[in-house]
Structures are given as C-alpha cells and as structure tokens.
Image: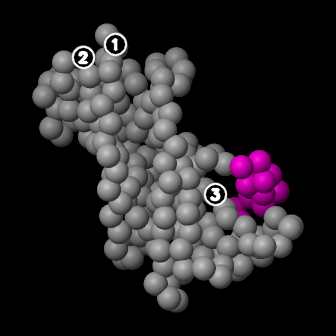
C-alpha cells in the first residue's frame, strides 16, 4: 500500500543532502530484533528527464530528480517483518521544463547479507509544481510484509534508487554534478 504525501517546501530545502538511514525498531514487537537497514544507493540517487532536443546535455534537462531520504520502521510478526518505509523524492525544474509535473520511477529492493536481491519493486511517483516553484517533493509511504524464511531482519537491507535508462546513465557519466 502506498500513500504519497506532499512535503513542505521549507523541509525540502533542508533534506536536499543525500542520506539514508536505518533506524532501530521504534515499535518492533521483538525489542531485541533490529530493523533492516535502509540505504539510498548513491549512484542511483539522482536522475534526469530530458526535454525534446535530441542531445542529452544540461541545457536540455526538463527535470532533475533526487532521492533525498529513506526512513524505515518495522514490526515483527511470526517469521515475517512488516516494513514501513517513507521515501522523500524531490523534483527540480531544469532549463527545458515546460510542464508543471514530472513522473519518476524508482525502486525498492530487499537484499540478503550477501547482497543478493530477494525482491525488487518498481514504484512510480508524480511530483506537481506550483507556478513558478523551482523545487517540489513528496514523501512516498510504502508498507510491505517480507517473509524472513528463518533469516534475521537485521541481516537484510532495503535499498532505494532511481530506475535509470541508458541515456541517463550516459548523461551522468559525461556531466557529473550537472
């Protein structure tokens, strides 16, 4: 289940620095069990949506996207963990922006202690801008129950990143830091 919530503009300015945090359980039914850690994958924390020009340069970026924060809480029930994840997604208008909204796609994956992917889910998110707002964002709320299969929850990781197209990967290789 997902519920997007609009993040206030003043808060967005403060959360533009990349961060990922795994929190100790604040309401776990097993006080000795720690939550899995939540991490935003640094190479996949930024994305770009291009304007109509064919060249993929900074002056042709319609919108930039930033995964700003991931906050994870969990509850243990039997041999499963119910994860409550809030992901802050920020959009910024680029020089080629013509629209007042942008759609991004990011993913949430659960990995085991050996970094093998146990499950991955793509998630769409829409950010709407008020005119003439340069930045806007949402907090995307995700709730999932993950069977542990005898594993400890603390042995798992929750990783978050933008789903990147080859053209976005090439753009960031050529134009680091915008």
Here the colouring is one colour
Q: Give coordinates of residue 153: x percent, y percent.
A: 31, 23
Measuring from the top left, give residue 137's x and y in whole percent. 44, 68
Query: Residue 70, image x and y in percent?
Result: 40, 49
Marker disc for residue 79: 2
Q: Nearer the viewer, mark 3 or mark 2?
A: 2
| Residue numbers of the magenta segment | 165-178
| Image vertical order of residue 69 relative to residue 52, above or below | above
Q: Quadrant of residue 35?
A: top left
Relative horizontal placement of residue 129, taking residue 94 as reference (left or right): left
SS class, disc 2: loop
Tell me, yes or no, whether the highlighted magenta stretch contains residue 32.
no
Eyeballing the image, is 14 above or below 115?
Answer: below
Tell me the chief SS of the magenta region.
helix
Residue at the outermost right position: 55
- Marks 1 and 3, how far apart in space? 35 Å
Give whichever of 44, 145 is nearer the camera. 145
Q: Secondary structure at mark 3?
A: strand
Q: Nearer the viewer, residue 12 or 123?
A: 123
In the picture of the structure, the residue carrying the numbered disc 1 is 149
Q: Give the distance between the C-alpha atoms of the residues marked 3 and 2, in whole angstroms.
A: 36 Å
């Amino acid at each position: 289940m997902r519920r997007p919530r609009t993040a206030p503009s003043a808060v967005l300015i403060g959360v533009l620095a990349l961060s990922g945090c795994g929190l100790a359980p604040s309401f776990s039914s097993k006080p000795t069990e720690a939550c899995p850690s939540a991490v935003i994958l640094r190479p996949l924390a930024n994305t770009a949506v291009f304007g109509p020009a064919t060249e993929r340069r900074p002056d042709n970026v319609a919108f930039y996207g930033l995964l700003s924060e991931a906050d994870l809480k969990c509850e243990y029930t039997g041999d499963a963990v119910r994860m409550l994840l809030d992901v802050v997604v920020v959009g910024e208008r680029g020089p080629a922006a013509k629209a007042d909204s942008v759609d991004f796609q990011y993913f949430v994956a659960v990995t085991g202690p050996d970094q093998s992917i146990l499950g991955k889910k793509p998630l769409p998110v829409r950010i709407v801008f008020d005119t003439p707002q340069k930045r806007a964002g949402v907090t995307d709320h995700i709730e999932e129950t993950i069977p542990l299969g005898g594993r400890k929850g603390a042995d798992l990781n929750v990783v978050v990143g933008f789903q990147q197209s080859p053209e976005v990967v090439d753009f960031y290789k050529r134009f680091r830091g915008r």
